[in-house]
Amino acid sequence: MKAEIIAVGTELLMGQVVNTNAAAISECLADLGIDVYYHMSVGDNKQRIKEAILQAEKRSDLLILVGGLGPTEDDVTKQVLAKHLLEKLVYDPQSKKKLEDYFMQTKCEKTANNERQVLVMENAKALFNQVGLAVGAFLQKNNHYYAVLPGPPNEMIPMLTKELKPLLQEILGKSEQIHVRILRFYGIGESQLTTKLEKLIVEQTDPTLAPYAKNTEVTLRLATKSKNTSEAIKRLDKLEQSILAIEDVASYFYGYGDDNSLAKVVVSLLKEKGKMITAAESLTAGLFQSTLGEVEGVSEVYKGGVVAYSLESKAKLLGISEASLLEEGVISEFTARMMAENARDIIDADYALSFTGVAGPDSLEGNSLGTVWIGFARRGKSPIARLFHFSKTRHFVRESAVMRGLDILRRELLKN
Amino acid sequence: MKAEIIAVGTELLMGQVVNTNAAAISECLADLGIDVYYHMSVGDNKQRIKEAILQAEKRSDLLILVGGLGPTEDDVTKQVLAKHLLEKLVYDPQSKKKLEDYFMQTKCEKTANNERQVLVMENAKALFNQVGLAVGAFLQKNNHYYAVLPGPPNEMIPMLTKELKPLLQEILGKSEQIHVRILRFYGIGESQLTTKLEKLIVEQTDPTLAPYAKNTEVTLRLATKSKNTSEAIKRLDKLEQSILAIEDVASYFYGYGDDNSLAKVVVSLLKEKGKMITAAESLTAGLFQSTLGEVEGVSEVYKGGVVAYSLESKAKLLGISEASLLEEGVISEFTARMMAENARDIIDADYALSFTGVAGPDSLEGNSLGTVWIGFARRGKSPIARLFHFSKTRHFVRESAVMRGLDILRRELLKN
């Protein structure tokens, strides 16, 4: 099956909104083994939406229209598609009930416009919107499949995965499906990794092997088409083994999956080993702890920590003598070690990380933007610190420091 | 002038990469007053790239192709366009020099493939790539304008703004340009705001007025076309005044501009008033301080603070008695007030915010996901705390709490 995604919304063409929906839908379709050859974005304009539909019908089996389901007059996606398919728009009972309950609860006054959101093509299957009010639709007609999804990603994603994906799976029936495995790496650049994997990448047939750099990480996407899941898993295992067998590639590999992260992996390792972590942060100003805090159930392994941004607060909150801070400098091996060790001691944790450096724009104590000391304290051992040089922006320097800190902790936890 | 953006890259259609380029280019074109009616994405496929070009020529004056300029065999954008326009591809001397210097410095071995990157259409103006190796191009031919830009955003953006934009400006000459003003609001929903502005939105002609919801904020985009800047500014001022004159709209308005943020505004207000801020964070686990830390020069107004995630650390780091924490509960007005006041006192700051609540997934002390107490301490006044109920995900609850905290501080700073 060939699919095409038509995103509707003038805000996309003005550049005020990035079309993340096209990527999310494409990823979902790829996992179903449905090929996507075109993305298109058009404004809230009946004529151009119609033209986009007509053209997509010429070259694709499945048309997914996303956006333009809202209450206002310029939300016309459903109306254009219904007219084109000679479909009457009728109220979807479940969605209409939700709409009425919503206005009952919020005591807002319901305008006629709001009811536009719960209209669905007569012969279509309504796709329920768990988050918002606009109902989606799926319809097979004239040898084409049509899906209509809401524009806001937080409404679109659940409708895509919980409502539309199962329908498509059903249609695809027992046909071949793509089985995907994502390997996640930290600490190695995309070019380095692809160089190491060159032979495998060049010779790839099935499974396919595709590297992608995402922010501070690199992921490898292994994919194979098969009717037989266990057969697919065998193939993916085989390729994974040959990847991780290549000289020190395994040491950068930290986990599987699209919704995984270094923080999640570190938190589960800490749980597994029954260890507690804390931190003393200067340039990262809480970003390391906040990154841990994003992981559900982190409270088992993390009780709290300190943000010591200024010299005084390094003295006051961490009990480091101002004299030695002035003598050694706040951006120094000494300070990084003391910050980590004292935080570990105050919180009585097994491990502590510390971050002190220059996030810019100005240099500090003669250190240029991107100079970062990361301290690491372990119960019963003397604290260590390592010097790093991160580049680019303030944001990237802070992000990189946090990721490196997580990596240091992960490698320590794997040791014992 | 009508423009169309054609993004080339199979990774876009697989959903592994989000097409941020289309938005960035559209925004740039909007500011030049160039209309964009279509975005398209196609894979690294000669036939489909050609079809996209043919179709775009039918409906647009300016075609911007982005992506597919790399060294590998499947990077064919330039080749397809050159063939279509009967243009010879020749080496761009400046880019070729950069390529050779690069391989000299890195001592990597240069393959023939690498030289593909510095090929440019014979009659085109080469657009220099300051970041990467792939050269861009701009060409006027057969009553169309063609631009070719590299795919990686960090290469595309500088080429767009420093190389292509000036060329387009020149072509547009003294013609009308769009003058844009962004107003940023926090604390009011998009629907509430649009309801208040309904009359203005319905009656809008020039300037235009468009609301957009971004995460926890709403922005209004005021835009007018004019040859005369001061005339445009007059019109924008007039509309802004009538917007802010509407009943309590002004109280939600916090600043101007696309790259502005509530944190930036709060930091400059703190500087202006010469006040220091600190925080004691539980559920936000450092996100509030980290958000401040993202702002350049924050060290003038922020020295550090505490992350007290567990009950013990609220006692240990903030000196709140365990007995009263157990008696009042960690998610309580008492605890929020004590956290803020004690943090303010320890850091000796003028203001302190505290955050304690349930980020989920499980409820805590009988409080459900999204229950958040925000404490606020001010030097010389007794601390206060307010109860909020945020919804949706763990991430959204933490984000919303931080934004609300910034808003509380902003409103206080505006008072005196």
Image (cartoon, coloured by chain):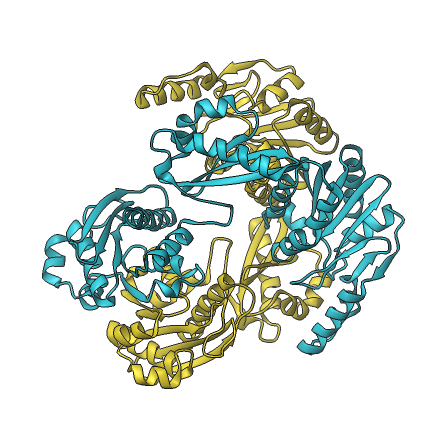
Chain colours: A cyan, B yellow
Q: Quadrant of residue B1?
A: top right
A244 sits left or right of B27 in the view: left
B204 sits left or right of B12 in the view: right
Residue B38 in picture, x, y percent from top left: 69, 39
Q: Which one is nearer the viewer's eye here, A30 or B36?
A: A30
Compared to residue B199, the image places residue B101 above or below, namely above
A16 sits left or right of A366 in the view: right
Compared to residue A161, the image places residue B144 above or below, namely above
Residue A41 in picture, x, y percent from top left: 68, 42
Residue occupying the point 69% across, 29% down? B52
Q: How many numbered discs sit on the rendered protein?
A: 0
Residue A164 in picture, x, y percent from top left: 71, 50
Q: Which one is nearer the viewer's eye here, B248 or B79?
A: B79
For the C terminus of chain B, the image quarter is bottom left
Residue occupying the point 61% across, 32% down? B64
| Residue, far front | A230
Q: Which one is nearer the viewer's eye here, B193 or B416?
A: B193
Q: Quadrant of residue A283?
A: bottom left
Can see residue A380?
yes
Can see residue B348?
no
Q: Quadrant of residue A297?
A: bottom left
Residue occupying the point 37% across, 86% down? B327
Residue B108 in picture, x, y percent from top left: 35, 20
